[in-house]
Amino acid sequence: MEKGSDFRQWDELIPDALGLIFSNLPLKEVLTVIPRVCKSWGKAVMGPYCWQEIDIEEWSSLSQPDNLDRMLRMLIARSSGSLRKLSVSGLNNDLIFSFIAEHAGSLQSLRLPRCEMSDLIVEQIVGRFSTITFLDVSYCVKISARALEAIGKNCKMLVGLCRNMHPLDTNGKPPEDDEGLAIAATMPKLKHLEMAYHLISTASILQILSSCPDLEFLDLRGCWSVILDDKLIKDKFPKLKVLGPLVVDFFERNDWDECSDFSDASSEYLAWEFMAGGVGDYFDDDESFDGMWDDEASLEELELRFYEGVHENVGDNYGWPPSP
């Protein structure tokens, strides 16, 4: 670029500006393409600016558990305590839940659908989530009213809760009011509540409405035991919008035996099991990736290989291309 130009070179942008730009790119691009462009971009990806919001929910739903744990640990470590939003599904061991809690000092939004957390681990770690304002624990079949009560007592700022269930997990079972009553007793500031296909009765819903005066949205799709008087709701709760219970959605339009949370169709997320760099303590060598690259000619064509990352003391030993 010519001297005296009013335009600034891309590699001269401050890291937080780069992080804001990169946050609009797919996770795959941020981890495998951006670091190879130039040093400044690589350093930005290694720093916290790109990882204040981590959304790997789609990727994690099709990833192997070991790969998922390693990916999540790496990205959370890169956030350096600045993590504000986290979306991930399918976590299945207590250690990773504890790791998230240890780095939750700035966390405001947490989505953990389809995770296998237990009541016990929730009770042990929920005290560290005091800054949470939105929580999604949909399809987490191992937790109960006990966990929701602990969440409500510790997350005083909670205004949004998703506790949807899969219809196959609740079909044919009698209503249970424990979870609804726990929500009513401990989460008075709720504005958004989703309980689709939940085992809950009309009495529990009315208790929630009485205890959560700020509630603006309530999802009751598939809660067949709930019967609400539309006129009563409009007169007594004019700000409230209720979806359901009698709403025909995907699960009614399609045979329940055929529906699934995971698509069998081909996806680039199946191809991209795990691609990341600069992981340091989490990986010993490139051989640990051998099982993640099977039958993927497209990846070979793109030459998306494991990237060692940026360290200040290595100079130019990693073959960095010149800045653009």
Image (cartoon, rainbow, N blue to C red):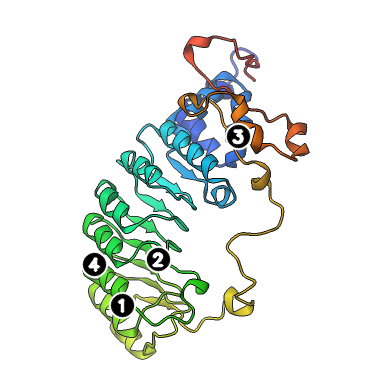
**From mark 4 to mark 2, how far is it between C-alphas?**
16 Å
Residue 40 — which label? Answer: none
Compared to residue 43, the image places residue 232 above or below, namely: below
**From mark 3 to mark 1, how far is it between C-alphas?**
44 Å
Residue identifier under label 4 = 188
Which residue is at the front of the view, 85 or 89?
A: 89
Q: Secondary structure at mark 1?
A: loop
What crowding class fits label 1: few (fewer than 14 Cα within 10 Å), some (14-19), or many (20 or more)? Answer: some
Compared to residue 50, the image places residue 201 above or below, namely: below
What crowding class fits label 2: few (fewer than 14 Cα within 10 Å), some (14-19), or many (20 or more)? Answer: many
Identify which residue is drawn at 61% across, 25% down.
286
Q: Earlier in the sequence, mark 3 or mark 4?
A: 4
Q: Secondary structure at mark 2?
A: loop
What crowding class fits label 4: few (fewer than 14 Cα within 10 Å), some (14-19), or many (20 or more)? Answer: many
Residue identifier under label 2 = 163
Q: Earlier in the sequence, mark 3 or mark 2?
A: 2
Residue identifier under label 1 = 177
Residue identifier under label 3 = 275
Q: Position of residue 143 (x, y in %)?
A: 36, 62
Q: Position of residue 74 (x, y in %)?
A: 47, 33
Compared to residue 307, the image places residue 245 above or below, namely: below
**From mark 3 to mark 2, how far is it between C-alphas?**
32 Å
Displayed quadrant of residue 186: bottom left
Query: What's the amino acid at mark 2?
Result: Arg
Query: What's the amino acid at mark 1?
Result: Asp
Q: Earlier in the sequence, mark 4 or mark 2?
A: 2
Q: Position of residue 300 (x, y in %)?
A: 75, 32
**Image depth: mark 4 or mark 2 in front:** 2
Which residue is at the front of the view, 287 or 205?
A: 287
Query: What's the amino acid at mark 4?
Result: Pro
